[in-house]
Image: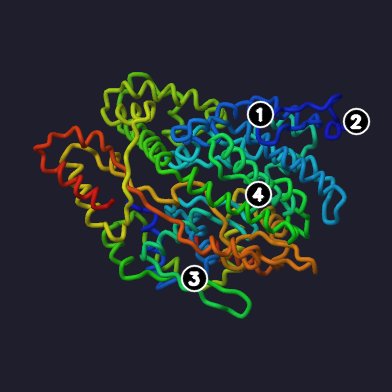
Amino acid sequence: MAYKDEKLHEEKVFKDPVHRYVHVRDRVIWDLIGTKEFQRLRRIKQLGTSNLTFHGAEHSRFNHSLGVYEIVRRILINFADRPNWNKEERLLCLCAALLHDLGHGPFSHSFEKVFKLDHEDFTKAIILGDTEVNEVLLRVGKDFPQKVADVINKTYKDKLVVSLISSQIDADRMDYLQRDAYFTGVSYGHFDMERILRVMRPYEDQVVVKESGMHAVEDYIMSRYQMYWQVYFHPVTRSAEVILTKILHRVKALYDEGYTFKMEPAHFISFFEEDVSLSDYIRLDEAVVYYYFQMWAEEDDSVLRDLAYRFINRKLFKYVEFNPNLQMKEWMELYRLFQQVGLDPDYYLVVDSSSDLPYDFYRPGEEEERLPIHLLMPNRELRELSRQSEIVEAISGKKRTDHKLYYPRDTILQLSDDRLEKKRIFELLYQSE
Amino acid sequence: MLDNHAKLVKVIASSAGIVGRKKLQKIIYIMKKLGYPFEEKYTFHFYGPYSEELTLRMEELTNLGFVSEVKEQKSNYYQYRYQVTEQGEDFLTHSPVDIPEVEDVVNQLKEKSSRFLELVATMLYFDDLTKEEVEAKVQEVKKKSNYTQDDMQEAWHYIHRLKQ
């Protein structure tokens, strides 16, 4: 029997708090899960710094990847005999679902911003490079690794396959919304996934939803909206993210100016030099990052020491609402005042915007800008969701952006009360509030 | 502060406005591929390279009042017209952005149709492939757009001119 068709003698199951069980019968899937590159995902948290706000949010990219695989597996059972669906694509879909986040690194959002990286490039590199994952995929077929990479990169010829893994209502989002809700402990993020899976249909080159399932999809859109504001965009999580980003900026700046570290940051040097090889990337996980943060909390450089200490011990920056349009002059004055009291404003006075985080919510957009969710009407016509659903239309038009100003209130409080700058800083900040 | 926002305002200001979200998406992508220091992350979507970050940043700019967004109804669809406001001009004077001169290239790009820019952006997305492979890939991922060999030839010439 060809390797691609091989089944395990007995089905394997993973207990899962979100889907109850993740079922594996294909030999290829089982072998991929066992590779070192996939096992590495156990050491990368799904939600980065959110555990500093929601203490339960310790789940990993490994959990999520298995969850996405399981959802796609269930969708394909539903698709099996439907028109427009090519059964030959089943294994490709399952592999792409399982491996879609393979290139994520520790705190990847901050790392990507500071070191100009892209986790999607590393996903591709792991799939196509000299890795255990590539070895497994090659056994399926010579061009199979490239096909898996194309599906994940959304450049595969069959858009229907792509849209299962990546669209406005895909297996990725359906898993992370539920999983993140479960582990953070919030009561948002829940929706009737079983219902959505039952009414999903392959339609030409996209996945659409039968009109009868519209209310389940509305619930999904609402949960996306609520999770965005309540979890992903939580201001305390953003504070931790701000400090993390500043640590990386600081340590890179120190390296660039020839600073002598107490312990050579060996794992980071290729990142500083923006020449990261695949093996450098793979060996950096959260355990390694935390180890360096512990070391940096004892460095001579006071900014690095302070920021690393803050991150490890959750001494986060406070924040005030900030409107860059109305408060530009105040910001410029604060910038000067911070300099005067010896706080480098480039590290200690930070404006953070909603667009600084990698989460989105549903917006219909203009024609051909991006693919919206389509409902399949009883007469076989397609209608864009927000044109049919008043609930979705209502939340699509709302203002959903904000800006916050982060600063170390504890440090400023420690300044002598005689200092006029201290009084003025608080006047300006409270005025912002 | 808000350096990435300021770069976008500068692009829109330099061209006296841009019509179409899709056009703006592709203009910024093409400029990024030409080496302009935009940091918006792009991935490949149904209609070519697309940045969710850019969409949200534009929404922020309109909510802040730095850019106006006017929705215009067309025969069977609608589109958005972006223009920099007085407050946006003021924001630029307070936010010196580190970006080379953009006026010429933006004005060149905005004269092209969004369909053509989508083709150019898609070809640039696959710039690690050979010319033949790029063309084959475009036909594969943009089947519905029906780009002809002439369209692609024109796009190659255009990319060549842009890079000069």
Q: Which residue type carries mark 4?
A: Ser
Q: Amino acid at mark 1?
A: Thr
User: Which residue in the rendered view is the most extreme toward the right?
Assistant: A1
In this figure, which residue is indicated by the disc labeled 2?
Answer: A1
Name the residue tied to disc 4: A166
CA gap, disc 4 and disc 3: 30 Å
Q: Secondary structure at mark 4?
A: loop
Residue A131: numbered disc: 1
Q: Position of residue B108 (x, y in %)?
A: 47, 70
Label 2, residues with CA under 10 Å away: few <14, some 14-19, many ≥20: few
Q: Which residue is mark 3?
A: B110
User: Given the image, what chain letter belongs to the residue carrying mark 4?
Assistant: A
> Residue B43: horizontal and vertical position, in percent?
58, 51
Chain identifier of the residue bearing label 1 in the image:
A
Residue B65 lies, with reference to residue A294, above or below; the image says below
Name the image quarter holding residue A242.
top left
Label 3 marks a residue whose chain is: B
Distance from disc 1 to disc 3, alpha carbons, whole Å, reads 44 Å
Give the spatial CA distance, label 2 vs label 4: 32 Å
At label 4, counting other C-alpha atoms closer than 10 Å, the crowd grade (few under 14, some 14-19, many 20 or more) is many
Per the image, label 1 sits on a secondary structure element best described as loop
Which residue appears farthest toward the bottom when viewing the image?
B75
At 58% from the left and 53% from the top, the residue drawn is A222
- Which residue sits at x=41%, y=67%? B12
Residue B36 appears anywhere in the view: yes
Respond whether the residues carrying marks 2 and 1 are from the same subunit: yes
